[in-house]
Amino acid sequence: MERNRWKSGRIDRLGSAIFAEVAAWKEKARQSGIDVIALDIGSPDQAPAQAVRESLAAAAMKPDVYRYPGTEGSARFRDTVARWFQHRFGVALDPTHEVLALMGTQDGLAHLALAITDPGDAALLPDPGYPVYGAGLAVAGVEAVPLPLSAADGYLPDFDAVPDAVWARVKFMILNYPGNPLSAVADLAFFERAVAVARRRGVLLVHDNAYSEMAFDGFVPPSVLQVPGASDVAVEFHSLSKSFHLAGTRLGYAGGNREALASLRALKNNIDFGVFLGVQEAGITALEMDMAGGGPGRVAGLYQRRRDVFVAGLRAADWQVPLPAATMFLWAKLPAGWTSSRQFARELLARTGVACIPGSAFGERGEGYVRLALVESEQRLEEAARRIGEFLSSNVEGNEA
């Protein structure tokens, strides 16, 4: 194949192309008449609450919302975020200097390295971890240093295992609890250790807390900013995409260290002019409803029911997947007899119509696993489990033959 002359080498370093591959597999399956149950992408299947949609619709009719909104977010949005953060975590944020509106957390996480590092710097990234972390580093020319995570350690990193020579080159490290794809959780004691490490090593601690409202069985995920003095060394990213069903509107925010946020704001001032004001009004309504106790943010019950139904179905099919403590994902070790996550995902989709993401898309240590998203109804998840059971049974019979 002829080489594309107009393609930067950065594109090849952005990460796995498996998401596009799986999309192509799904399209091929649909064209052949297969009913696809798409458990690959973590895109909520529910609409925002009616009041949130009405807020967006009303705002869209105002003639003054079509001006450039400003990179930092409206004062009303940032004030509401600060009040919600105090309500949810008991943490006071200065809405002027310690809150920055984003086009979803992915926007901030992808641009952060460009804002706070120089080429040749290094950053610690969770492995397995969300692909955008590495993509942001690739664009910025920053070295990605894997921070190994394993089931044996509860998917919590061993900071002491990172050599001093690596710490000397690291500008920031990313943590993600509750995590994607691992669905792992961490308590406040862990974040106290992480903040102490960041302070001692002189690095910025970046916490992706996009799933803070999606935990189960009574667990309440903390914020790293609850640790006293954490804002000296930490920033935290939040999203309204999953918890408030606002994924398509692209709305999130970062809070914490004002120097890091000032740098990110300065970069974004040269890239975009912020989130549509109508979307920010919808976000304000969602957060206000959540603080009042009747809002759309309490989605944990929905996903806990889906988790219970799907895990029970898979275990009945003799696939012993763990029961996740949070998020909208199952992180499942490949069934016996399978070694390639990509091959398993492709065969599963081709033969059953159930789409998932190979674990290899999330880093070297993701091989041997797949991620399944709980983004279909309980009835569809039961059907997915039934199909998967037949698939696994047929493979066992085939292997025995």
Image: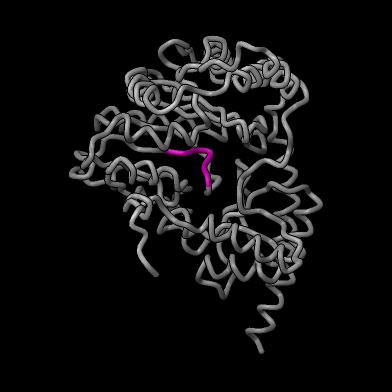
- Which segment did they paint magenta? 175-180
- Residue 170 x/y as whole percent: 25, 39
- Residue 204 x/y as whole percent: 32, 30
Q: Is residue 10 magenta?
A: no
**In this orientation, does residue 230 appear?**
no
On screen, residue 10 versus residue 74, left or right, reads: left
Seen at 65% across and 61% down, the residue is 26
Colour convention? one colour
In the rendered view, would you say 289 is above or below 23?
A: above
Quarter of the image with the N terminus in it: bottom left
Quarter of the image with the C terminus in it: bottom right
- Residue 397 x/y as whole percent: 69, 82
The residue most toward the right is 379
Seen at 32% across and 29% down, the residue is 115
Residue nearer the viewer, 387 or 61: 61
In the rendered view, would you say 11 is above or below 218?
A: below
Which secondary structure type mostly characterizes the magenta part of the structure?
loop
- Residue 217 x/y as whole percent: 67, 38
**In this orientation, does residue 180 appear?**
yes
Residue nearer the viewer, 229 or 358: 358
Residue nearer the viewer, 96 or 281: 281
In the rendered view, would you say 20 is above or below 97?
A: below
On screen, residue 120 versus residue 265, left or right, reads: left
The residue most toward the bottom is 401
On screen, residue 225 versus residue 196, left or right, reads: right
Seen at 76% across and 51% down, the residue is 309
Give the mark count: 0
Seen at 66% across and 79% down, the residue is 396
